[in-house]
Each structure stands twice: as structure tokens, then as C-alpha cells.
Image (cartoon, helix red, strand yellow):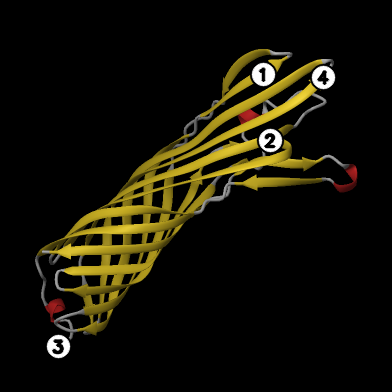
């Protein structure tokens, strides 16, 4: 019989590690570049763009009639960008610190943005065999996590007004930090392609949804350094933004191929995580940001069962 081990519950434990190579997608406007020529006026919005970055997932599973799975996922990504032109800061602290008339605009601007993603899942499942090759597992569980986002912008302008030579530099740090905990449900499954006493090869797929009750904190602090005819002054201001207390809905899906030989197994596949309304900051460019955070890319797993 194919996959004889599926015929009865098998007690055991498994430790696993996964290498993640994901790309984060969450456009946030941070600066406007304006052409003041009346013959060819335009406004360009510059948004955050992230490249692929590595991460990891560690966990263990207890297999039996009811399976228990505990795992921790960590992912960090960051991006940097520089631009020049007739610039208007999008975040509120920079917008309120624009150079005075008739200058009005910054000359250069930079951003350093980062995302830190830490999620813990505790799942329970029980398998159902549908024929000799197909197995599915309904899953229920708990998910808790923290998603911390930081946007560090810096703008500079040089200008002369009324015989005064001035330089202005504005540095602003805005954050969107979320934590939450809540239920998780889903289903995953395997379809055996090759099954022998020496080796098993199967296709795997899963879909999960979670609903995390939590809180967003959105601090925003700005520091202004002004130099007029060689005399430097520094000031700072804090944008007061109330915390947001509501739930975050997330969807996760993955497809891949699993190879098992003896106590070792390996899986390679594609994974997508969609966190709705994750970026909760406010900008003067496009108003309230309720942007989805999309994490997707390669997932490669190695597991040892004993």
C-alpha cells in the first residue's frame, strides 16, 4: 500500500527550520517633487520600495492523532533612497517645517525605512485521508505578533532672503508599530506523487486566516536645525497622533514540494502573507495611510523527525 504510515497515527516530534527570502510591498509616499514651470507643471510622488531580504522561521511539532505545531517567524527589511528637486515633505513634521517664502521647497531629501516582523503561531490540527494519496489537515490556532515600521526622513535647503544666508535641515522619524493576538484558522494538505519505503515526494499547499486584536502606536518626532548667517539654532516638535485599537486581518497561503527520506525532510515553495491596513500613519501627501503589507517569496524548510 502507498504511504502505509498514513494508515494509523504515529507518535513523534519534529524540529524544523526555514529559510525565507521575501519581498515586502507597501508603498508609502514620503516626498513630492514639484516642477514650478507654468508651461510644464507636474507633481511626482516618491514611495518606499523594498528589495528581497532574508528571514527565518524556527519551530517544533508533536505528531499524533492531534498535531501541535509551534513556530516563530522573523523577517527584517529596509530601504534607502535619495532625491533632489523642488521637494515637499509628505510626513507632517517635515511639511510643517518647509522653508519660508519665497523658497518654499527643500533641495534634497533622503529616507531610511525599515520593517521588523515577528510572529508566533501555535496550531492544532488533525489529518483526514481522502484516498491513498491525498491528506488534508484542518487547522485551528492562536497567532500573536509585532510588526514595527520606521520611516526616517531628512531634508535640506539653502537659500538667501533679505541678505540673510540660511541653511535648513529637517530630520523626522515616524513609526507605525503594531502588536496583536487572536485566532487563526486554515487548511493545508499533501498529495503524494512518489511513495516508497525509501522516499516520499508530495505536493503541499495551505491557506490560513488570522484576526489579531491589538494596538497601533504611531509616534512622530521632528528636529529642525536652522543656520542664519552662521548662527545655528535647533528646535523640535512632536506630532500628536492617538493610538489605534482595533483588529488586524491577515491571510497566508503557500504552495510547494516536499521530499522525505528517513527522519529528514525538506520543502521548497512559495509563500504569501497579506496583512490588511498595517500602515496607520498620516501624511500630507495622500492623507490617512491604511496600506496593506504584502510579504511574499521563497520558503525553504529542513526538518528532522524522531
- Vertical arrangement, residue 64 with respect to residue 40, above or below: below
The Cα–Cα distance between marks 2 and 1, rounded to whole angstroms, is 15 Å
The residue that disc 4 covers is: 161
Q: Report which quarter residue 100 is drawn in.
A: top right
The Cα–Cα distance between marks 3 and 1, rounded to whole angstroms, is 79 Å
Viewer-closest of 278 and 185: 278
| Label disc, if present, on residue 266 of the rendered structure | none
| Label disc, if present, on residue 108 of the rendered structure | 2
Residue 23: image x %, image y %?
A: 47, 56
The residue that disc 1 covers is: 226
Residue 128: image x %, image y %?
A: 22, 74
Q: Residue at image x 79%, y 27%?
A: 103
90 horizontally vs 40: left or right: left
Residue extending farthest to the bottom is 1
Secondary structure of the residue carrying tag 2 is: strand
The mark nearer the N terminus, 4 or 3, is 3
The Cα–Cα distance between marks 4 and 3, rounded to whole angstroms, is 88 Å
The mark nearer the N terminus, 2 or 4, is 2
Secondary structure of the residue carrying tag 1 is: strand
The residue that disc 3 covers is: 1
The Cα–Cα distance between marks 2 and 3, rounded to whole angstroms, is 70 Å
Q: Residues within 10 Å of mark 3 (few under 14, many from 20)?
A: few
Secondary structure of the residue carrying tag 3 is: loop
Q: Residue at image x 33%, y 53%?
A: 56
Amino acid at each position: 500500500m502507498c504511504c502505509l504510515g498514513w494508515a494509523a497515527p504515529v507518535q513523534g516530534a519534529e524540529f524544523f527550520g526555514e529559510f525565507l527570502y521575501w519581498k515586502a510591498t507597501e508603498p508609502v509616499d514620503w516626498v513630492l517633487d514639484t516642477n514650478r514651470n507654468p508651461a510644464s507643471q507636474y507633481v511626482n510622488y516618491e514611495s518606499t520600495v523594498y528589495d528581497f531580504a532574508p528571514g527565518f522561521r524556527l519551530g517544533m511539532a508533536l505528531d499524533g492523532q492531534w498535531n501541535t505545531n509551534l513556530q516563530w517567524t522573523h523577517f527584517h527589511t529596509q530601504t534607502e533612497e535619495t532625491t533632489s528637486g523642488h521637494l515637499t515633505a509628505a510626513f507632517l513634521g517635515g511639511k510643517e517645517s518647509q522653508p519660508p517664502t519665497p523658497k518654499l521647497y527643500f533641495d534634497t531629501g533622503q529616507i531610511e525605512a525599515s520593517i521588523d516582523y515577528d510572529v508566533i503561531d501555535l496550531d492544532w490540527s488533525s489529518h483526514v485521508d481522502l484516498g491513498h494519496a491525498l491528506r488534508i489537515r484542518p487547522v485551528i490556532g492562536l497567532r500573536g505578533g509585532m510588526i514595527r515600521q520606521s520611516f526616517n526622513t531628512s531634508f535640506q535647503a539653502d537659500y538667501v532672503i533679505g541678505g540673510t544666508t540660511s541653511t535648513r535641515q529637517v530630520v523626522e522619524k515616524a513609526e507605525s508599530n503594531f502588536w496583536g493576538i487572536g485566532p487563526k484558522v486554515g487548511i493545508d494538505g499533501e498529495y503524494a506523487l512518489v511513495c516508497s519505503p525509501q522516499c516520499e515526494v508530495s505536493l503541499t499547499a495551505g491557506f490560513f486566516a488570522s484576526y489579531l486584536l491589538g494596538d497601533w502606536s504611531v509616534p512622530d518626532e521632528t528636529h529642525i536645525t536652522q543656520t542664519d548667517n552662521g548662527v545655528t539654532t535647533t528646535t523640535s516638535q512632536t506630532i500628536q497622533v492617538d493610538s489605534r485599537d482595533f483588529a488586524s486581518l491577515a491571510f497566508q497561503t503557500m504552495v510547494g514540494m516536499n521530499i522525505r527520506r528517513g527522519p529528514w525532510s525538506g520543502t521548497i515553495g512559495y509563500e504569501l502573507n497579506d496583512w490588511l491596513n498595517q500602515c496607520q500613519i498620516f501624511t500630507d501627501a495622500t492623507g490617512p495611510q491604511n496600506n496593506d503589507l504584502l510579504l511574499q517569496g521563497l520558503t525553504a524548510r529542513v526538518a528532522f523527525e524522531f
